[in-house]
Amino acid sequence: MSWHVPEDDLLAYARGELAAPALWSADAHLVSCDRCRRVLAEAGDPVALDAGWERLDAELDAPRAGLLESLLVRVGVAGHTARLLAAAPVLRRSWLGAVVAVLLLSVAAGHAVRGGSFPTLFLALAPLLPLAGVALSYGPALDPTYEMTVVAPMHGFRLLMIRTVAVLAVVLGLNGLATLALPAYGLRALAWLLPALALTATGLALTPRLGPVLAPSLVGGAWVGLLLVAEALRAGADAPLAPFTAAGQGVAAGVAALAAGLLFLLRDRFDLFQGRAV
């Protein structure tokens, strides 16, 4: 090979100052010329070269972002937050498929019941779904990405709230779509919303003391027990259960507000809980 890149051009190339079209010619030539590559290696800054290789290795080793993570980043969510959200087990297709199946069955039951005033099965199940979703999104016993979240430079309470908001946005959205499938009941089909918020807030408030499994389990069991007692005390087959009356909705709103206040007061305890294996 009779032609080689001039040494001044190689020095400019090493500094990143060589402009096109000389840059393109140098790129093409360096692919096949050992002599020019040796000259370039001697002319370049070894510290900058090592830094460049490190950046290349980091870029090649970085995990590829999934569809959900990419969408979250596009709408303005920070990259590290998007990765924590995308890794939440409750945003997996298996969990979402199970939630959709439960809602479809409860909506079908609501349409099948004739003469009733309320879709009782749907209203009973809908508040449990966000409670279960939040329970599955946080804690070493259920979250396969728990080790990653523990070492994340983030307040434990903030991490919990990020996961909770993600779960509530998904589950409450699905519940809302299911409510639209029960148009005959009107606004009465929304009677699940306040109990759902009350159960979720209560479960979160109890989590630092009881753990992410026992706390929602006890709250869910209390909800089921309350419904059984309300069913036993119901005045007639067409009457709504007590939690879905105006008085019951007021109580649910009060419980949600109190639990939210308690959760705020206990927010620092999530840092201690976060490092505890339960």
Image: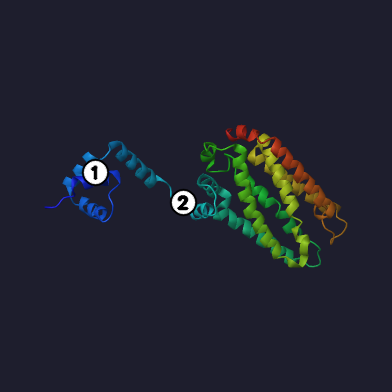
Please name the residue shown 21% across and 45% down the image. 8
**Does 24 sit above or below residue 206?**
below
Can residue 67 be seen at all in this image of the molecule? Answer: yes
Mark 1 lies on a secondary structure that is helix
Q: Residue furthest right?
A: 235
**What type is the residue that disc 1 sits on?**
Leu
Which of the 4 image quadrants contains residue 112? bottom right
Of residues 244 and 86, which is closer to you in this image? 86
**Which residue position is annotated with label 1?**
11
Q: Residue furthest left?
A: 2
**Which residue position is annotated with label 2?**
65
Quarter containing the C terminus: top right
Q: Position of residue 101 (x, y in %)?
A: 63, 59
**Does 51 sit above or below residue 226?**
above
**What type is the residue that disc 2 sits on?**
Ala
Of residues 207 and 168, which is closer to you in this image? 168
In screen coordinates, is 79 left or right of 113?
left
Please name the residue shown 69% across and 42% down the image. 203
Q: CA distance from mark 2 to mark 1?
A: 37 Å
Mark 1, Cα crowd under 10 Å, few <14 / some 14-19 / many 20+, is some
Q: Earlier in the sequence, mark 2 or mark 1?
A: 1
